[in-house]
Image: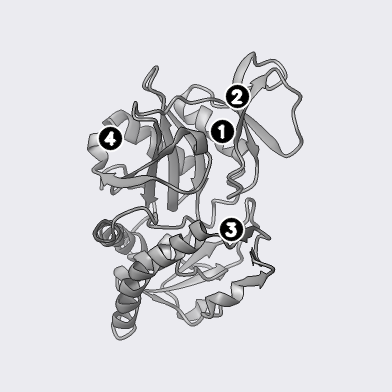
Amino acid sequence: MHSALWWRDFEFQDGVVTVKKTGARLRLEPGLIGEVLAWFPFYFVVESWRLKSASQSGPRIWFTPDRPRPWYLVWSVLHAAGARIADSPETADAVFVFDDCTVCHPVQAQPGTRLINAGCQSIAKSHVARVFEQCFGYPLSVDPESWAGRMVEKSEINGAHDGRIIQGPAPARHGHVYQRVIDNRNGRGLVEDLRCPMIGGRIPLVLRKRRREAVRFCNSNDEVDFAETDTVFTPAEQDSLVRFARAMRLDWGGLDVLRDRTDGRLYVVDVNKTDMGPPIAMKLRDKITVTRRLATAFRDLVRPSSSLQPDRRS
């Protein structure tokens, strides 16, 4: 699917938009339409970067099996970095494995090909939780049939956003995972997620996403800003996050991190290797600043001398 005509990714029928790749269905409601309209000013900024990069000699990236569409963060970042989407894998400086699927198949490539995210073959919630416990030394998962108290139930699959809080003990449902409830409230009636862009083992900055507690599992935000990594995480916490990304074999992506306000511990609750963004709720100037900051790290990632080995410091 390497056509640049991204609107062909959707089907429109009876007021519902269906994403062909995943089957996700979105009803055309005022809120969704408003988000799309809010996204377009940033899209036009990135288009100007894309047109400029087309005339430059920046790195050429081939994406497989899918080509990122304009709503994916890497699309904006690569154009801000002066990079281009290659015409074929043979002419590419790097091959980026870009697949929305929860579990993907190994990529066949010529020896010596520079691969990005080729080793990150599963972002299933159960796999994320296992790797998290190995790297951080304490669990996120719970046994639903023995856990006495509130717990989160959510689908294994990528991008479902179907989490809900239930009371345990409860019978386990096939295709779902069960996790402890993290108290990430900020005292203003909002919960705060810490989105950590991870690029070649670096966390260039942190996106702080806040929404009402009643819609804590939704994919929309009431407030989004960004902060310097050192002001959000200690050096030891950064080392743990980088170690986690290395174990996931994630070269590019975003970690969804929650800090429990009762004990201060971090919990990585999701891994996104085809993350969208920047978040719509961000101010336009912040979107541009964040994208340019990430572009610097992206240039280092695709630079031929880069080893793709994680290193905490940006």
Q: Which of the two discs, 3 and 1, labels the residue nearer the N terminus?
A: 3
For the residues labelled 2 and 3, the Cα–Cα distance comes to 27 Å
Position of residue 255 relative to residue 92, above or below, is above
Residue 41 in view: yes
For the residues labelled 1 and 4, the Cα–Cα distance comes to 22 Å
Residue in view at x 42 percent, y 28 percent: 184
Q: Which of the two discs, 2 and 3, labels the residue nearer the N terminus?
A: 3
- Circle 2/circle 4 CB separation < 8 Å: no
Residue in view at x 27 percent, y 41 percent: 229
What numbered label is drawn on residue 129?
1
Coloring applied to the structure = one colour
How crowded pointer 4 is (Cα within 10 Å; few <14, some 14-19, many 20+) is rated as: some
What numbered label is drawn on residue 293?
none
Residue in view at x 60 percent, y 39 percent: 125
Element assignment for label 4: helix
Q: Amino acid at mark 2?
A: Met
Q: Amino acid at mark 1?
A: Ala
Element assignment for label 2: strand
Q: Amino acid at mark 4?
A: Val
Q: Which of the two discs, 1 and 2, labels the residue nearer the N terminus?
A: 1
- Circle 3/circle 1 CB separation < 8 Å: no
Circle 2 residue: 151
For the residues labelled 2 and 4, the Cα–Cα distance comes to 26 Å
The mark lying in front, picked from 1 and 4, is: 4
Q: Which of the two discs, 1 and 4, labels the residue nearer the N terminus?
A: 1
Circle 4 residue: 232
Position of residue 29 relative to residue 43, above or below, is above
Circle 3 residue: 100
- Circle 2/circle 3 CB separation < 8 Å: no
The mark lying in front, picked from 2 and 3, is: 2
How crowded pointer 1 is (Cα within 10 Å; few <14, some 14-19, many 20+) is rated as: many
Q: Residue furthest bottom?
A: 55
